[in-house]
Image (tube, rainbow, N blue to C red):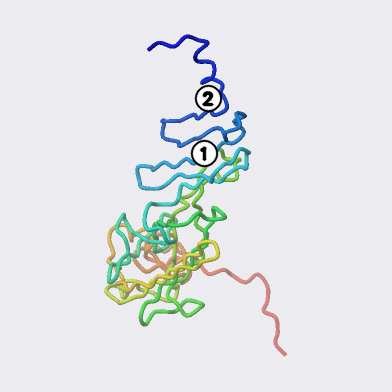
Amino acid sequence: MKLSVPALAPILSLLSGCIINLNTDGGDEVNGDGDGDGDSSSTTDTSTTANDEITTSATDSGTDTGAEEFCGLSEGPAEPWIKLAQGGVEIIDQGPVSLECGGQGSFMIRFNVAMGGFVPMDPDVPVHVVLDVEGYNLGPNGHFAESDYTVFVGCCSDDYNSYDYCYYDPLLVTMFPPDAIPDLEVLHGLPGTLTLTLTANDQEVDQVIPVEMWAMPDETWDFCNYGYYGTGYGSGYGYTGGYATGTTGYAIEPQGIASLPIPLD
């Protein structure tokens, strides 16, 4: 049956007060509250990057609130969680923790960080990492190494003048061994304990992981062993004075005294 325009008029008057716009492009969006003025919109956008990090923003209810985007959160459990990894391998119970030579010439232990299960109130999330090694807890607080970090889980900007510009990897935690260990190879195979504390807003998440230290020298260690302030190539990374005579580098001659010594009473 075909209806004429006059016959459709009563139906159109009923439909004009309720307009529903279904957006099928992946961002669930509903416009209209039944009074015909379309004065409310709610949009939540969630996308997953290739490395399983989540880009998400808070819900915008009709006004521009400057919602924070988070690119440093990963998929996982619904409760707050944190994981550390080295070389793409997660640190697990009895797993290795490797010492390496950093690009600035110092030995270090570096971890990549992954976390999720919560929406932080601030893009700088506090993370406390402690590493204890049996017999070598020579750090200032009685640990082998300790680090307080704020891991930036926001989205980095390409603009150098922007607040959220990142000139380093924001999902990286770096720790340094004690200076009092002259030969770091003694750490290889020793048991250790890695303790993580994630502060997810007002909730603290603790994780204790028994680990095994891995300190096997390779060709990359030569750079840190050179000892710019040490005793020459292959002599350890400690600060033991100037270059020694007969080694790679320049020998530092003793400085002469330009005046007579001060007499003692």
CB contact under 8 Å: marks 2 and 1: no
Q: What type is the residue that disc 2 sits on?
A: Leu
**144 vs 16: above or below:** below
Give how far apart the Cα atoms at labels 2 and 1 are. 25 Å
- Circle 1 is placed at which residue position? 43
Image check: 188 left or right of 16? left
Tell me which residue sits at (47%, 9%) in the image. 4
> Quarter of the image holding residue 138?
bottom left
- Residue 136, horizontal then vertical, whole percent: 39, 79
Q: What type is the residue that disc 1 sits on?
A: Thr
Tag 2's secondary structure?
helix
- Circle 2 is placed at which residue position? 15
> Quarter of the image holding residue 47?
top left
Q: Quadrant of the C terminus?
A: bottom right
At label 1, counting other C-alpha atoms closer than 10 Å, the crowd grade (few under 14, some 14-19, many 20 or more) is: some
- Residue 246, horizontal then vertical, whole percent: 37, 65
Q: Where residue 265 is drawn, which disc sits there?
A: none
